[in-house]
Image (tube, rainbow, N blue to C red):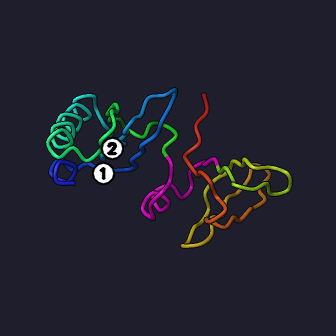
Amino acid sequence: MPVIEANHFELVDVEFVKEAGTRYLRLYIDKEGGITIDDCELVSRAFGDLLDQEDFIEESYILEVSSPGLGRPLKKEKDFARSIGREVEIRLFKPFNKEKEFFGILKSYDGSQVTIEQEDGSELTFERSGIALIRLAFDF
C-alpha cells in the first residue's frame, strides 16, 4: 500500500488465479485521469521487488499490473457512488426470471441492494449478496 498511496493510485482489485496451468497474481490499479503504462511499470517493479524479498507466495507465478479497464468491476462503496447514472452490467449467481445477466442505468445502491433502470424504463432491484459481478457496461 505505501507504493499505491505514495503515487495517489487506488488498488481496485487483486486476483491470484490459475489459468492453463500457470498462476497469475494480478493487481488492478487506477487513479484520477487513468493509468499509464509507466504507472503499471512503477507498481510492478516495486511489488516485484517486495515479493521477491519477502517470498510471500511459495509457488511460481506471473505478476501482472494493469488498469481495471473499460469494464471496471464495482466493488467498493465509492465505486458505486461514482457510477450512479452510468450503464452497468449485472451477473447474478442464480437466475431471476430465468435470466442471470442484466443491463441498465445504476439508479441507487446501499449496503444490501442495487437498483437499475432498464431500457424500457422499468426498475429492478437486486440483493448485493446475489450479484456475482457488477461492472460498468461498454458498447463497441
Q: Image check: 100 left or right of 91?
A: right
Let me know if residue 81 is in the magenta part. Answer: yes
Q: Residue at x 67, y 62 (%)?
A: 130
Label 2 with label 1: CB-CB less than 8 Å: yes
User: Taking 49 as reference, is 74 above or below it?
Assistant: below
* Picture quarter with the C terminus: top right
Three-letter code, disc 1: Glu
How packed is label 1: few (under 14 Cα within 10 Å), some, or many (20 or more)?
A: some
Q: Who's the residue at 22% across and 31% down the image?
A: 41
In the image, which disc is placed on residue 70?
A: none
Q: Is residue 116 above or below residue 27?
A: below
Q: Label 2 amino acid? A: Ile
**Earlier sequence position, callout 2 versus callout 1:** 1
Front one among 137 and 22 = 22
* Disc number for residue 10: 1
Circle 2 is placed at which residue position? 29
Q: Position of residue 27 (x, y in %)?
A: 35, 42
Which residue occupies 16% across, 53% down?
Answer: 2
The Cα atoms of the two marked residues, 2 and 1, are separated by 5 Å
What segment is highlighted magenta in the picture?
73-89
Local SS, label 1: strand
